[in-house]
Amino acid sequence: MSTTLCFDFGNTRLKVAIFKENGFQEQIVLENAKPETITELLAKWNPDKTILSSVIHHDPAIETILAAKSKFHLLGPTTKINFTTPVGKPETIGADRLALIAAAVNLYPNQHNLVISLGTCITFNFVNNQHEFLGGSISPGMQMRFRAMHEQTALLPLITPSNEFTLVGYDTKTNLLSGVILGISAEIDGIITAYEAKYANFNVLLTGGDICYFAPHLKKRIFADQNLIFKGLYAICETNN
């Protein structure tokens, strides 16, 4: 049974997903990206193939280790993908966004797809029914907004995200929760509406580590999939290995 490890090094979390015979098995959150951590994972799972998507400055030794122990691919500008990138500077597209679009095209081919990722930043990524990634937009994510209000004011606390709040906040914490979570939800609904005016029919795919805070508040029809980036990484790994 073939095994593939898909590594996703994001700004907030370091994760790896295990696939066996085309099927997603489990996701692991890594404590760090040290070479010895990667070596231990490889010893445990003995993968046939590996792929790394990284938006951080990781230790180059990791790539050497992965290449020595498996058929390895580093997601980047030279990666073979199932869509085109007719944008100004395609080499600047983040590895995570490439993986998300690859997943959308693989799951819903020949359709318009808007992929929204809720992480450190919120990214809106649009690929049309001709499999052209046209770009999108980027805005501050939930944690970034909480930190900004805490760090740039004298009295507002840094709070822990929660869905226990009302529209009309009754104390400082619930005011912050209502402002950020409902504000972002309204932002997402509003941008989807703007895309609807331009493109009519399309799929909306919602993913990212903060998905649980926003899915209950969205009015628009969405497909929520927390593992979307890994499905894209796996499809890319199969093509490039």
Image: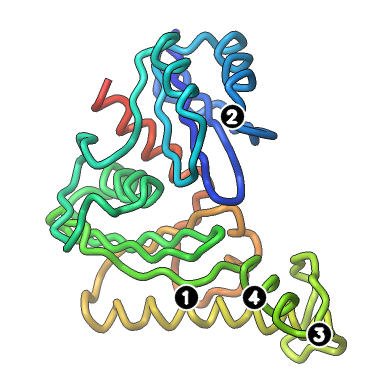
Numbered disc in front, either 4 or 3: 3
When the figure is inspected, residue 79 is found, relative to residue 148, above or below; the finding is above
Assign a secondary structure to mark 3.
loop
Q: Which mark is residue 26?
A: 2
Residues under numbered marks 3 and 2 in contact, where contact means CB atoms less than 8 Å apart: no
Residues under numbered marks 2 and 4 in contact, where contact means CB atoms less than 8 Å apart: no
Instruction: Give the amino acid type for the residue marked by disc 4 in the picture.
Output: Ile
Instruction: Give the amino acid type for the residue marked by disc 1 in the picture.
Output: Ile
CA gap between label 3 and label 2 equals: 42 Å
- Residue for badge 1: 188
Whichever of callouts 3 and 2 sits on the residue coming sooner in the sequence is 2
Q: Quadrant of the N terminus?
A: top left
CA gap between label 3 and label 1 equals: 29 Å
- Residue for badge 3: 154
Instruction: Give the amino acid type for the residue marked by disc 2 in the picture.
Output: Glu
Question: Dot 2, how many residues are within 10 Å of its Cα: few (below 14), some (14-19), or many (20+)?
Answer: few
Question: Dot 3, how many residues are within 10 Å of its Cα: few (below 14), some (14-19), or many (20+)?
Answer: few
Whichever of callouts 2 and 4 sits on the residue coming sooner in the sequence is 2
Task: State the residue at coordinates (13%, 58%).
Answer: 86
